[in-house]
Amino acid sequence: MARMAFPMNANDIIERITGRLFRLNEPLMARCKNVIRRHLYQLLINQREPGYPPPSSPIRAVFLVNYPAMWPSLQSIFERMSADACFDPIIVTLPTHAHGTVELGSNESNFQYFSQYGNQVQRGFDESTGCWLDLRSIKPDLAFVITPYDAYPEYHSRSLSHQTRLCYVPYGIMSAKIQDNQFNRPFHYRCWRIFCETQIHKELFAKYSSVDQRKIVVSGYPKLDWYRNDRRIEGDRLWPVTIGKPMKRVVWAPHWSIPLRGARKHWLNFSTFHRNHLYFLEAMKNTQSSINWLFKPHPALASRVVRSGLMSNFEFQCYMDEMLSLPNVIQCRESEYLDYFATSDALITCSVSFLSEYLPTGKPILRLDNPDNVRFNEFGDRLIEHLYRAQSVAEIDAFLQTVVLNGHDPLLEARLQTLREVLYFPKHHIGGWIKDYLKVELEAAQGSMEAAAGGSFC
């Protein structure tokens, strides 16, 4: 598989130089870095709008996507725009970016996934010519970017923000205590609008960044619109049962942040896969008559398992083959995993955003706690307060027996209270609300020009 590596940037150099000091007093150094970056970005990045041209009619919105698994964070916005004659939404697909490289081998598969939207999809990278699509040829009024990491030089926020109104919806519900990554990157300062998940997240932007608060709009998280889909989900079709009796359905969703061989820990260190992957294989074998399992790994897990030295490619494939040969185990890689969430009985995970995404099901959640992880931010601390937690396989066993199989769920009411008080889950359709908000904002931008011409915006 072809790989395209990028040179080390200034931030990478800073991280290497300060690495030793960071380990001496991690919380203090993190706060110091945050303060320094806030002042530098506020000083060096101009947050004033550069004077965008009047919006076209219909409004042309481009969605730059490189991970099908992350698409649900933008999908409901795109679909509501597609149903509104005032908008002309276009998906531009890119090869996946992971661990500092662009995986060119994913370019065609990503395009094929989004080809379900027909002529609303264009390739961002042409493998036959080695050329990237120049967005100026599309003349977008809006551009949605799926991650804030400026991974593609051709679509860097520095240039994008001068070409069009740059919009951002977080690719997950930000819960980990990594304030610079989540709220204080140069990308955030260059955005025209940031649609954030809750009022708590807006307050975290104010606490950990100097991003102009007028850019930050509390909209709710569009991925949660899925729970409002008025359609019947056939659980028996999703969860094939080969045993002739009812079985519980459990999702196991491991995170990718496995430390490299020889390293004490990863900077995130949420993953517990390297500690319990053999346990789960045995648990699946031992529950063939009582539990249907869904294996829903983070998209980066497979490559990280190999890169960390935990297993070779061959060993990981053998592990997967043995797991999926069991009659009570299926795997989910596609983006429509929320169908499985809704028809399951419990979630077991060391992932982060899934804790929020699963909460609206009302079903029990077991958080696999790596005690050396980077911890949770203020939102995350409130989120996890009433979730089950396990650090040992004995505690996982107890959860499976007591909560899943016996149905004893003492944290149910407290968990539902967390859903009501912490997670902003409005009654309105979130993607539709964002679409309507953008229409009003661009109508205001059009303003007197349309009135002088005697026309209307849409």
Image (cartoon, grey):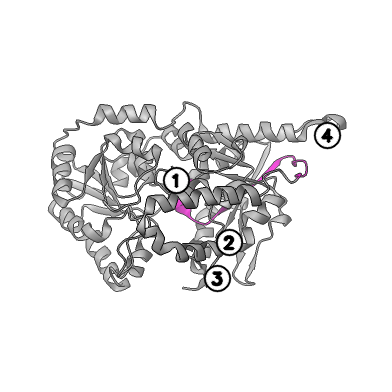
Q: Amino acid at mark 3?
A: Pro
Circle nearer the viewer, 1 or 3: 3
Q: For the point 36% across and 47% down, which residue is it? A: 352
Question: Which residue position holds label 2?
Answer: 152
* Residue 99 in sight in this render: no
Percent position of residue 360, x then y: 36, 34
Quarter-wise, where is residue 324 in the image?
A: bottom left
CA distance for labels 1 and 3: 27 Å
Question: Is 454 placed above or below 126 here?
Answer: above
Does the CB distance between marks 4 and 1 fall below 8 Å?
A: no
Q: Amino acid at mark 4?
A: Met
Classify mark 3: helix, strand or loop.
loop
Question: Which residue position holds label 1?
Answer: 172
Q: For the point 36% across and 30% down, which residue is it? A: 419
CA distance for labels 1 and 2: 20 Å
Question: Which residue position holds label 3?
Answer: 7
Percent position of residue 91, x then y: 59, 51
Nearest the eye: 434 or 38: 38
First reached walking from the N terminus: tag 4 or tag 3: 3
Classify mark 4: helix, strand or loop.
helix
Q: Residues within 10 Å of mark 3 (few under 14, many from 20)?
A: few
Classify mark 1: helix, strand or loop.
loop
Magenta residues, start to end: 51-72
Percent position of residue 114, x then y: 53, 53
First reached walking from the N terminus: tag 1 or tag 2: 2
First reached walking from the N terminus: tag 2 or tag 4: 2
Quarter-wise, where is residue 231 in the image?
A: top left
Residue 55 magenta-highlighted: yes
CA distance for labels 4 and 1: 38 Å
First reached walking from the N terminus: tag 2 or tag 3: 3
